């Protein structure tokens, strides 16, 4: 069976930016394959899709970015069922707050597995089909993929890696007809933030030993930042706009605050502005 509408596969759609992106893309009259590790968590998306009048344009499938067999099976089934794959939105990810001495290398590997290698696994599976379609490859990264942030070492390392990979892939993919874009949200009010553990402040500080004061200061600053965060829906609109633009930029921020923050790094040749800024977060 061939689907006449463009087909867009989005990872990590059970909540937050992923859920809202599925809705925003469906509103552009594209067929959305909304994937999630546990399809049993699809009720929020299905309810929102019905309320938005796009339920017939969204299907839910299982895809675990850390399981290559799951990824290959999902992508193959989408192409078999619809005859095409026009775009991939890599959105699935996991936050982590911590520091190396307390967490160890094993935790950093775990964060990289989800946020970096998971992106590569899905991208590898999708690229042959995106080439055929002359399609789009979008990856939701973070301002943390440009500016390193205290107690986000593993998370930022993974997002830096994704940005470096996609920036390097961009001209290669363009040569075979695939446009590559990274979308960089700043602070977003979503379940992702709660999953990162920001609400467990007291327990984290108590276990932080010599890092306790710095961590307490960081968590307090972060709580203030997320009090003024943009909504997941606003961030998702930026993703949908990048997907539908004729010539999307490689790097797109989802808000003016995100643009200003990323701008500090991109204009900072020796690193003093960034490290001076973030030092104030922990002192």
Image (cartoon, rainbow, N blue to C red):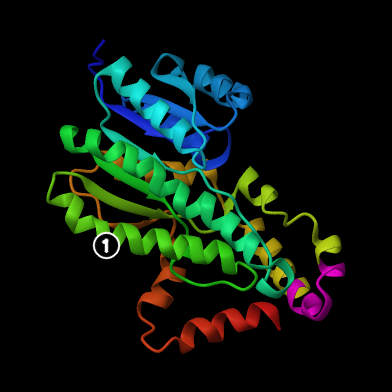
Horizontal side of residue 21 vs 29, given as left or right: right
Residue at figure coordinates x 36%, y 75% from the top left: 266
Residue 257 showing in the rendered view: no
Q: In the displayed structure, would residue 41 be above or below residue 229?
A: above
**Secondary structure mostly taken by the magenta-highlighted segment of the chain:** helix
Q: Residue 161: within the magenta?
A: no
Q: Quadrant of residue 177 in the image? A: top left
Q: In the displayed structure, would residue 33 be above or below residue 159?
A: above
Numbered marks: total: 1
Q: What are the residue bounds of the magenta stretch?
A: 205-215
Placement of the C terminus among the 4 image quadrants: bottom right
Q: Residue 213: within the magenta?
A: yes
Residue at figure coordinates x 53%, y 48% from the top left: 93
Where residue 210 sits: x, y (%)? 80, 81
Where residue 208 sits: x, y (%)? 81, 72
Residue at figure coordinates x 46%, y 28% from the top left: 34
In the image shown, does 171 or 220 lie closer to the viewer? 171
Q: In the displayed structure, would residue 64 be above or below residue 42?
A: below
- Residue pushed farthest top? 1
Q: Quadrant of residue 221 in the image? A: bottom right
Q: Which residue is mark 1?
A: 168
Where residue 173 sits: x, y (%)? 20, 50
In the image shown, does 23 or 122 lie closer to the viewer? 122
Helix, strand or loop at label 1? It is helix
In the image shown, does 79 or 31 lie closer to the viewer? 79
Residue 175 showing in the rendered view: yes
Q: Residues within 10 Å of mark 1 (few under 14, many from 20)?
A: few
In the image shown, does 23 or 180 lie closer to the viewer? 180
């Amino acid at each position: 069976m061939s689907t006449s509408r463009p087909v867009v596969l989005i990872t990590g759609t059970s909540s937050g930016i992923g859920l809202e992106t599925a809705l925003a893309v469906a509103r552009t009259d594209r067929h959305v394959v909304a994937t999630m590790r546990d399809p049993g968590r699809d009720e929020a998306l299905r309810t929102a899709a019905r309320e938005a009048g796009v339920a017939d344009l969204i299907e839910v499938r299982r895809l675990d970015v850390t399981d290559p067999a799951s990824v290959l099976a999902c992508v193959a089934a989408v192409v078999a069922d619809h005859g095409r794959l026009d775009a991939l939105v890599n959105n699935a990810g996991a936050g982590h707050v911590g520091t190396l001495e307390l967490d160890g290398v094993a935790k950093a590997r775990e964060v990289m597995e989800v946020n970096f290698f998971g992106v590569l696994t899905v991208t590898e599976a999708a690229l042959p089909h995106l080439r055929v379609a002359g399609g789009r490859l979008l990856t939701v990264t973070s301002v943390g993929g440009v500016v390193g942030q205290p107690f986000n070492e593993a998370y930022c390392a993974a997002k830096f890696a994704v940005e470096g990979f996609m920036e390097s892939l961009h001209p290669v993919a363009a040569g075979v007809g695939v446009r590559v874009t990274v979308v960089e949200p700043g602070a977003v009010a979503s379940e992702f933030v709660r999953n990162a553990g920001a609400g467990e402040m007291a327990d984290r500080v108590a276990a932080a030993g010599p890092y306790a004061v710095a961590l307490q200061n960081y968590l307090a600053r972060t709580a203030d930042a997320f009090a003024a965060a943009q909504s997941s829906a606003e961030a998702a609109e930026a993703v949908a706009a990048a997907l539908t633009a004729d010539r999307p930029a490689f790097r797109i921020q989802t808000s003016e605050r995100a643009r200003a923050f990323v701008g500090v790094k991109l204009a900072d040749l020796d690193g003093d502005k960034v490290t001076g800024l973030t030092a104030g977060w922990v002192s």
